[in-house]
Amino acid sequence: MKIVSIINYKGGVGKTTLTANIGAKLASEGKRVLLIDLDPQASLTFSFISVDNWKEKYQEEKTIKSWYESFTDRRELRNLSDFIITPEKVNKKVDGKLDIICSHLGLINIDLELAVMLGGASPRQQRNNYLKVYSLLAQGIAGIHKEYDFVIIDCPPNFNIVTKSGLVASDFYIVPAKPDYLSTLGIDQIDKHVKELVNDYNNYSIQDENVEYSKINPKMLGVVSTMVGIKNDKPIISQQQYISKMKLLDIPVFQVKLRDNKSIYSDAGEFGIPVVLKKANNKTANMVNLELNKVTLEILNKISGRDKKHE
Ligand SMILES: Nc1ncnc2c1ncn2[C@@H]1O[C@H](COP(=O)(O)OP(=O)(O)OP(=O)(O)O)[C@@H](O)[C@H]1O
Ligand SMILES: [Mg+2]
């Protein structure tokens, strides 16, 4: 099993869109995929499940918020598999499996509750609490590792505790970014903050005499340029400078770029089916599909070039 987080502090850069599409593409190739929506805005959830359905069936008991609450309320982490849903519509279109753990607006409060739990009277207690809280999702996923080939985590646009617990659980992470000033500004910061998290976590886990916490090493697979303006088959000049700038950051950048196309990505008619699984009915839609196929392939190639943590 491979666990991949999709992160960027910047909002609206295409994290959720990328998560939904690579998940759907992998599932269409026969893979067993679990998507986890860690964003209280729940956009990923509502890409696959209607709001009415969510309200009626899942809101109360079957979201990642309820799962975290089993820990914050009762200190008994429930089995993550009890919170998994199989959205019907998309699963009719794939050979593999595309499951999801839904989100909930109340996940915002979970972050606050977890923050309180990080405290401790002594350094030893603080260290134990730190490891316990940040490793929650990793523990949950460990319980279902035989059931999926890929777990893809859609992170919220912040670096709060829930996001960090997603990274702690991950083998890899990907940073979608728009090639513009504000979006590129934060990329080396993300890299720096992930390294700090990894250092802190590993230092604590080494000191802990209790060996249940293994060291972590989430690897940055790279930046995926999203919403790229394309003219004459090339990124528009104003964006090229940011794409070049990203390459100078000493951070891997995906070769494929996802073009900007509101009508295909946002207004795409059929609900519950990501663009990559829809039939392309014109040249541009074809290009969009091709890019999404390529980004998935590039991810697979990058992943297979590395020693695996969860096999
Ligand atoms: N390549 C693209 N071209 C045009 N529009 C896009 C593209 N990718 C995504 N979008 C649209 O842009 C909006 C933001 O995308 P998305 O929700 O994936 O971003 P996000 O990074 O997950 O946002 P947030 O930080 O709020 O979670 C959505 O309406 C989506 O449909
Ligand atoms: Mg999102």
Image: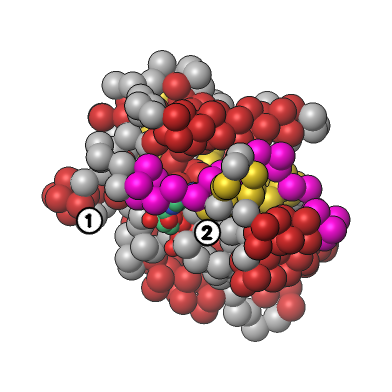
Q: CA distance from mark 1 to mark 2?
A: 30 Å
Can the viewer see residue 58 in this picture? yes
Farthest residue to the front: give it: 232
Give percent across and percent down for residue 304. 74, 27
Q: Residue at x 35, y 27 (%)?
A: 281
In this picture, which residue range is highlighted in magenta?
Answer: 246-266
Give percent across and percent down for residue 286. 46, 28
Crowd band around label 1 with a 10 angstrom C-alpha radius: few (<14), some (14–19), many (20+):
few
Crowd band around label 2 with a 10 angstrom C-alpha radius: few (<14), some (14–19), many (20+):
many
Q: Residue at x 73, y 73 (%)?
A: 124
Position of residue 132 in the picture relative to residue 50 (left or right): right
246, above or below 54, in the image: below
- Residue 163: say if magenta: no
60, above or below 27, in the image: below
Can the viewer see residue 209 in this picture? no
Which disc, if any, is residue 13? 2
Give percent across and percent down for residue 154. 49, 51
Q: Residue at x 15, y 50 (%)?
A: 52
Closer to the camera, 258 or 147?
258
Give percent across and percent down for residue 184. 67, 65
Q: Quadrant of the C terminus?
A: top right
Q: Residue at x 82, y 60 (%)?
A: 249
> Is ligand 1 closer than 8 angstroms to the Cβ of mark 2?
yes
Q: Amino acid type of disc 2?
A: Val
**Ligand 1 visible in quadrant:** bottom left
**Residue where numbered disc 1 is placed:** 60
Q: Quadrant of the N terminus?
A: top right
Q: Amino acid type of disc 1?
A: Glu
